[in-house]
Amino acid sequence: MSDPVQTLRALTDDAGFDDVFVYAAVPSVVEMADELLAEDGCLNFFAGPTDKNFKVPFNFYNVHYNSTHVVGTSGGSTDDMKEAIALSATGSCSRRLW
C-alpha cells in the first residue's frame, strides 16, 4: 500500500475516523493516527511508551478547529490489552460509515 492514510481515509469518503486506537508506541504510527481522525475524532493511545522522552508531532490546528483529541488508556492488565486487541482484530469493535 503506497499511501496508507489515503487508502484508509477513502473508506470514509475522506471524512476520517471517529476513533483511532494506537497499540504501539511508534512515532510514525501515532502520526498516521492523527491524520486519520475525523472532526471530533479521538485518538486512543493504548500503548504506553517506555521512553520518557517519547514525542511525536501532533496537528494542533485540528485540535482547535476540528475538536480532535487524545486520550491515554492506562490501568489495564496485560490480559485487558490482549482482549482489546482480539476484539479489534475480529471486528467486534464495529465501525459506522456515513
Image: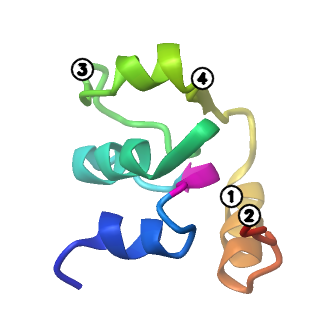
Q: Which residue is mark 3?
A: 53
Task: Look at discs 1 and 4 and give the one toward the viewer.
Answer: 4
Q: Is residue 4 above or below residue 79?
A: below
**How many angstroms separate mark 3 from mark 2 (CA)?**
26 Å
Q: Which residue is mark 1?
A: 81
Question: In the shown orientation, is residue 54 left or right of residue 83?
Answer: left
Q: Is residue 54 above or below residue 27?
A: above
Q: Is residue 44 above or below residue 90?
A: above
Q: Which residue is mark 4?
A: 67
Mark 4 vs 3, N-terminal side:
3
* Discs 3, 1 touching: Cβ within 8 Å: no
Residue 19 image point, x, y percent: 65, 50
* Discs 4, 3 touching: Cβ within 8 Å: no
* Discs 2, 1 touching: Cβ within 8 Å: yes
Mark 3 vs 2, N-terminal side:
3
Question: In the shown orientation, is residue 76 left or right of residue 9?
Answer: right
Q: Residue at x 74, y 48 (%)?
A: 77
The amino acid beneath tag 4 is Ser
Q: Which residue is mark 2?
A: 84
Report the span colored magenta.
15-21
**How many angstroms separate mark 2 from mark 4 (CA)?**
25 Å
